[in-house]
Image: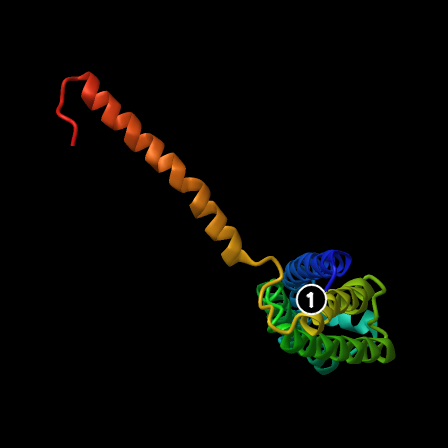
């Protein structure tokens, strides 16, 4: 493998890692602040309407939907939100693991299928919000692009485990810290000699 190919592989590894980490973290944030909140609001609204609270009964009448329909929609949002959190966590956690890129890719593809099914359901029920398309479709596609970078690295270098090789980085840090320790020791010995203490 020539130098150009090595540089290309390193760029792919770095791009894949950063894309997956950003996508996974953003997906978890979006799931907690948006998807789960929609599910909770729908479910609680249906519960309050079933209890006969006038405000919520009137709200459902104006929307032209029943409490059972709204409850089912809320449960769907909650389930999708939980899966988004799981998929986002796995993607971010494995963003530096080339050896787990195939498993991560399967998780992202399954997430994309779930999101498409959810959007189809929302479209036919009249609850579709175009703001969801970013986190539901574009974000998983962005994450899928990132994991395919790691898959290419895995094919080019099957023995490679990490995208950023943390073990080598930690080793270099330890090596750079070693001389500093010896300098401190020499300084302490010199100070003891200056104070008249015998050299050990």
For the C terminus, give its image quadrant: top left
Foreground pick, 87 / 71:
87
Task: Name the foreground residue: 125 vs 176.
Answer: 176
Residue 52 appears in the rendering: no
Does 25 appear above or below 140?
A: above
Q: Quadrant of the N terminus?
A: bottom right
Residue 128 placement (x, y as % from top left): 84, 70
Residue 62 position by quadrant: bottom right
Question: Which residue lies at the image location 58% right of the left edge and 68% below the top edge?
Answer: 161
* Residue that mark 1 sits on: 35
Q: State the SS at label 1.
A: helix
Residue 121 drawn at (x, y percent): 81, 80
Residue most extreme to the front:
2
Q: Quadrant of residue 107?
A: bottom right
From this view, report whether residue 8 is shown above or below residue 181.
Answer: below
Relative to 192, 4 lies left or right: right
Q: Residue 80 sits in which quadrant?
A: bottom right
Res 14 seen here: yes
Left or right of 123? Residue 159 is left
Question: Which residue is at a point 79% across and 68% down the rendered structure image?
Answer: 141
Horizontal placement of 98 versus 134: left or right?
left
How many numbered callouts? Answer: 1
């Amino acid at each position: 493998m020539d130098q150009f190919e090595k540089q290309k592989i390193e760029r792919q590894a770095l791009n894949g890692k950063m894309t997956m980490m950003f996508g996974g973290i953003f997906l978890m944030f979006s799931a907690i602040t948006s998807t789960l909140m929609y599910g909770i609001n729908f479910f609680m609204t249906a519960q309050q309407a079933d209890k006969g609270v006038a405000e919520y009964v009137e709200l459902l009448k104006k929307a032209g939907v029943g409490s059972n329909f709204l409850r089912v929609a809320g449960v769907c949002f909650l389930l999708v939100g939980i899966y988004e959190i799981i998929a986002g966590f796995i993607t971010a956690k494995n963003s530096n693991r080339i050896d787990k890129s195939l498993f991560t890719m399967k998780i992202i593809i399954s997430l994309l299928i779930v999101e498409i099914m959810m959007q189809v359901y929302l479209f036919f029920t009249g609850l579709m919000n175009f703001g969801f398309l970013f986190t539901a479709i574009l974000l998983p596609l962005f994450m899928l692009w990132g994991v395919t970078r790691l898959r290419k690295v895995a094919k080019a270098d099957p023995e490679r485990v990490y995208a950023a090789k943390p073990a080598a980085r930690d080793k270099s840090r330890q090596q750079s810290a070693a001389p500093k320790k010896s300098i401190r020791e020499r300084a302490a010995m010199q100070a003891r000699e200056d104070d008249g203490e015998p050299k050990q």
